[in-house]
Image: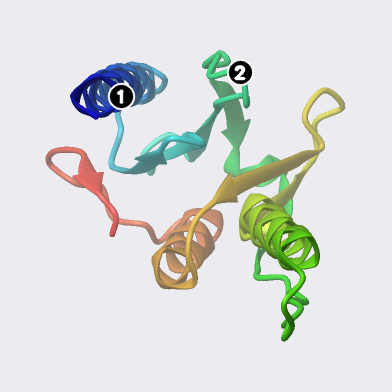
Amino acid sequence: IAIPAFLIKWFVDKKIVFINKLLVDVYTKTMSSLQSVDYYFYNADGSIAVDSKNGTLSYIKVLPTMEVLPPVIIKASDILEYYFYNPGMTTTKYYGRDMAVAQEVLIDNLEAIGARAKKRGIHMKVNDLQHPKVVMNMTAKEAEYWTLILSKLLDGSLEQSSSPKLIP
């Protein structure tokens, strides 16, 4: 019993170290992506940062393979539309004794939750042929802040900060 528990702990510890390195890499690339970073947000899916003085936004995407893509720099004037999208989701309840069916229902529900999480966040349509749509995954609470930041960035009223601020 001790050997399988040790192997599980070793695997989980290794995964945690890998994710922490990934987050440090995303953070480092975010901070160096713009001339001056006023506001930023990052997670295991990528990052978004804003330079209010120059009216630019940086977007970094992390692929499912955990590869961190180079930053995409977007001028505020190139943002055509932005909105928060939180898709609905259908789940199934199963009442019965058939474990195979119960497992299949559980897998379907987990896939629905995963698909929803991939689409939830700030969506931006951008005047850029290489990157016409940008999706930054975040929760509704985080998006409240970022829709306000984007609104102020577009109308030129976003205040500069003396140091980069993680929002929220």
Helix, strand or loop under label 2: loop
Residue hosting label 1: 4
Q: Amino acid at mark 2?
A: Thr
Q: Residues within 10 Å of mark 2 (few under 14, many from 20)?
A: few
Residue hosting label 2: 65
Q: Residues within 10 Å of mark 1 (few under 14, many from 20)?
A: few
Q: Residue 125, how many percent across, how many down?
A: 77, 49
The one of 159 and 30 positioned closer to us in this rendering: 30
Q: Residue 144, how many percent across, how many down?
A: 45, 72
- Tell me which label, 2 or 1, sits earlier in the chain: 1
Hey, which quadrant is residue 78 in on the image? top right
Q: Residue 2, how many percent across, how many down?
A: 19, 25
Q: Mark 2 and 1 residues: CB-CB less than 8 Å, in contact?
A: no
Q: Residue at x 80, y 65 (%)?
A: 101
Q: Residue at x 40, y 64 (%)?
A: 142
- For residue 126, side relative to residue 117 (left or right): right
